[in-house]
Image (cartoon, rainbow, N blue to C red):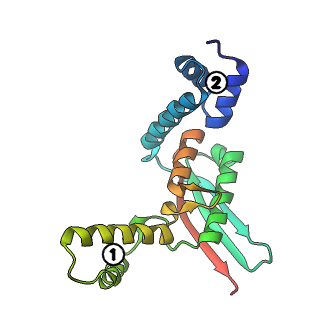
Amino acid sequence: MAVSMQMIKDLRQLTGAGVLDCKQTLEQTDGDMEKAAEILREKGLAAAAKKADREASEGRIEAYVHPGNKLVAVVDLRCETDFVARTAGFIELSHDLAMQVAAANPAYVSRDDIPQEVVEQQRAVFMEEVGDGKPEHIITRIMEGKFAKWYQQVCLLDQAFIKDEDKTIQQLLTEAVARLGENILVKGFGRFSIE
């Protein structure tokens, strides 16, 4: 099947991949747009994993002020170069993350940021809720489920993205790394409100 420029343009807009990658992938999949998009996403995710160890010392501080001026969220989003920090995609990502913090009110960036004593306190609460008399493997599964739900409430990276509930913030960042070509990480955030 002949690959048209419009097909390449559409795939590029969908995935953020380069023109040559889009053309080759469309040729490889005989013009199947969905298959090509999936292949390019997988390539992008693999590339994102390789970039995770690179230092991210540039970036931007983004503030979101909710209408009424009674709620503000601030996010420190980092990348590798000031060039990427000034791109529309990075600016949009930082704004979306600030809105996420305002809406979802996480307490920590990731699971690694939660102090061990907080985790142990939560474990004690969950154990009390679970009670005694259940087999060990059942208790383990219940605890895993409770912790997964708790992490989704308190950790920014585990939360469902407010604009797309099927995607976590971690997935959103990974896609941005694949699209922008640099390591991106949330260094910190703050949220202030008048109740």
The amino acid sitting under disc 1 is Gln
Q: Which mark is residue 19?
A: 2
Furthest-right residue in this view: 68
The amino acid sitting under disc 2 is Val
Q: Nearer the viewer, residue 103 or 57?
A: 103
Q: Secondary structure at mark 1?
A: helix
How many residues crowd around disc 1 within 10 Å: few (fewer than 14), some, or many (20 or more)? few
Q: Residue at x 65, y 49 (%)?
A: 90
Q: Residue at x 31, y 85 (%)?
A: 128
Q: Nearer the viewer, residue 136 or 75?
A: 136
Q: Which mark is residue 179?
A: none
Residue 181 in view here: no
User: In x, y percent, where is residue 88?
Assistant: 72, 46
How many residues crowd around disc 2 within 10 Å: few (fewer than 14), some, or many (20 or more)? some
List the residue tagged with mark 1. 116
Q: Residue at x 59, y 70 (%)?
A: 104
Q: Nearer the viewer, residue 121 or 188?
A: 121
Question: Picture quarter containing residue 70?
Answer: bottom right
